[in-house]
Image (cartoon, grey):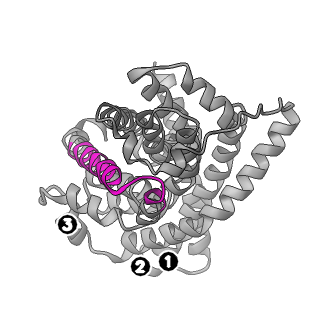
Amino acid sequence: MFDIKAIWDFFQVQILGMKWLNSMIGSGLIALGLDINGRWAGSLQFFFYDLIKITVLLCFLIFIISYIQSYFPPERSKKILGRFRGVGANCVSALLGTVTPFCSCSSIPLFIGFTSAGLPVGVTFSFLISSPMVDLGSLLLLMSIFGAKVSIIYVIVGLVIAVIGGTIIEKLHMEKYVESFILTAGSVDIESPDLTKKERVIYAKEQMLATFKKVFPYILVGVGIGAIIHNWIPEEWVARVLGSDNPFGVVLATLIGVPMYADIFGTIPIAEALLYKGAQLGSILAFMMAVTTLSLPSMIMLRKAVKPKLLALFIAICTVGIIMVGYIFNALQPFIL
């Protein structure tokens, strides 16, 4: 049992966390005559370490997830979802969301396609919630910072929010609040050709490069903000706003996250720096969920597909769910972190 724990700790710290990389960058900066305990050199160490770590993990994860995704094109996903009814359909839809695009703006076109194909609107909303919030990549990246317990619980509660949210929308019969041009668009069933393993590898490589080019600017911004928080923002400031002394920290973190636009890869370095500075775990995760699920650009896109009443209900469900999850994680923090 001890050997298994030692192996797991090594995997989490040195493989996922790449602590060896942090030490190597620190040694390099010291060799250049810089004091890594100072603000400027410490910021450089954080920046290069997180940038390289996230880039390597990102490219690896996107390749693997895109390879898996090649088995679930929209036509096949639609057929899979069409076999289920009720809450079961919402569960399957939420799970399918974990192997699809990495941000809400990328998920909305698929949501529109599924809705146009005649799938229940509640089922498609379960997909729309889970897709940006709990993709498979987030599981390993969160694990590299917060550990296995936090990352697994994060994914589970994200799926629960997606299932409950979609179910509520379904039970309230909100189909009439979807724009008519989507409901009347219909769909064309085109069988996706069977790909060879080589073609799937090529597809995964192309998806990796395309996604990396799209999200890399957000990673740069996120790592830059993280470096500033990590080395320039006093701990007492962060603790006062997002720490245990502020009972409204979760609400504030959620409201701050909503106007922003990034995917989970851009928010992770910010989350890492906030945790180091004393912010509560639930407040950090609420911020991440709000950024990835309720960003202003994605809400503007979604408004083109649904009427204001349905959009407001979607935002309300996600906001309440995120805030509840934040407080739950804050209560569990002593036991899971």
User: Which residue corresponds to mark 3?
Assistant: 241
Which amino acid type corresponds to the residue marked 2 in the rendered image? Arg
Distance of mark 2 from mark 3, alpha carbons? 22 Å
| SS at circle 1 | helix
Q: Earlier in the sequence, mark 2 or mark 3?
A: 2
In terms of depth relative to the viewer, which is nearer, 3 or 96? 96
Q: Where is residue 206 in the image (x, y as percent from the top left)?
A: 78, 51
Q: Horizontally, is 77 left or right of 207 in the view?
A: left
Task: State which region is magenta.
Answer: 301-327
Q: Position of residue 60 (x, y in %)?
A: 68, 46
Q: Residues within 10 Å of mark 2 (few under 14, many from 20)?
A: some
Q: Where is residue 150 in the image (x, y as percent from the top left)?
A: 37, 39
Which amino acid type corresponds to the residue marked 1 in the rendered image? Ala
| SS at circle 2 | helix
Mark nearer the viewer, 2 or 3: 3
User: Which residue corresponds to mark 1?
Assistant: 41
User: Which residue corresponds to mark 2?
Assistant: 39
